[in-house]
Amino acid sequence: MKAMILGTGAVGSVTAEVLGHSEEFDRVVLADLNIERARRAEKKISNDKVTVQKVDASDIDSLTKAFKGIDIVLNAVIPRFNMNIMKACVKAKANYSDMAWDVALDKTKPGEIIEKTPAMEFIKLDAEFKKAGLAGMIGLGCDPGLSNLFARMGADRMDRVKQILVRDGDNGAVAGHHFAPLWSPETLIEEVLMPATYYADGHYRKLPPFSGKELFQFPDPVGKLPIYNVDHEEAETLPTYIGEVLGKGCDYCDFKIALGDDYVEVINVLGKLGLDSTKPVDVKGVKVAPRDVVSAVLPDPSTLADRAKGDCAVGTAVKGVKDGKDVGYFIWTQLNHEDCHKKYGHSATGYSVGVPFAIGAILFAQGKIKQKGVYPPEMLDPQPFVKMLPKYGMNCLEKKL
């Protein structure tokens, strides 16, 4: 089977290594607009079945041509190109997977009811994928991804679900940098400055950026951290798919992430100055998007693994009713940045996303994922993912609430 990994940054390079050494794939193409970055990943894998190709994700025609003969495309570029890539997959008859989608598509203001979440923009391609006999697996990384699967695990044990709370905590830091995101700076800035999606009283709504601050006790060694509501994919699909499609119900759902005071201060300043904008401005005769400038001056997340220290944990709290009694579970995965780099050469942030992303492709190649159409992770059986995590040094832990 042939796979193409589109984007070889902090996450794509992890996925490339896993698939490059897997038995399921006899050819793995590392595709990137930055060909030197792809070659670095290729050199590290050092396997004859791995090749490099320059691809521009903004050009549907060139994508379609590149995808010909590929069995599955793993989209690891920034989400603004997802629709292009998905449409090219349909034209080229290639299956598709990504680890996030473009939450910026929603312009709803805080307090307003969201008529259609951004997820639905991509799920509307469901019929096209089914007609072509293709799988379109969206949001299949860590969060979203494992977090959705953890929600499904908890929901499967309940007669009725009341709450789904996704929590992302990281007490880590990067030596030598005051502000150095361990995943795409563009994605971080976009998500954190946007009004945050949550679900309550039968509707999706928005909360103001940096709202809902609270101290959350993550499992040790991550510990207690301040968390905030942030716009994230899980809150756009879990209430619908767990609640309605699977018939478990859902009264409330949100996503919160741990953000240090320095991060909050920097991102707030970027927003106030308009440096989060993707609209090009004229700078001495050159058109440039402010957010691209910010990303360009920040270090490449794929180069930071050796300086990252601390621990991260991503988990989902599911509360509901079983046999008339209240029950609850917190199911999570956790990694140490330094240990992860020593063993695998990656930060825990990139590794925890890239591994589940790769596992999805492996399970697809093994014939254990058969669903056609476009769907989020909670529509998959969690158990094959959970069983495969330890093979790659990851875990699935849980406790009762």
Image: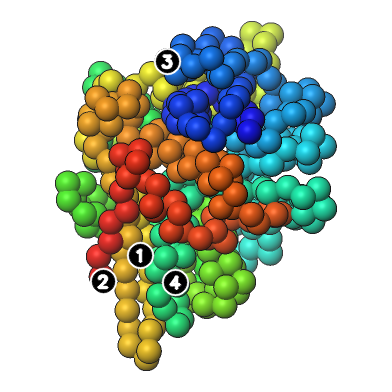
**398 on left or right of 300:** left
Res 126 seen here: yes
Q: Do the residues under discs 1 and 4 have CB atoms within 8 angstroms? A: no
Which marked residue is nearer to the observer: mark 1 or mark 3?
A: 3
Residue 44: mark in rendering: 3
Query: Does 361 sit above or below residue 201?
Result: above
Of mark 3 and mark 2, the one earlier in the sequence is 3
Foreground mark, 1 or 4, reads: 4
Q: What label does residue 317 carry, if any?
A: 1
Q: How many marks?
A: 4
Mark 4 or 2 closer to N-term? 4
Query: Where does the image place residue 226, in percent across and percent down from the top left?
Result: 27, 51
Which residue is labeled 4 in the image? 155
Is any atom of residue 299 visible in this view? Answer: no
Residue 230 spot, x, y in % from top left: 45, 51
The earlier-in-sequence mark between 3 and 4 is 3
Comparing 160 with 131, the one in front is: 131
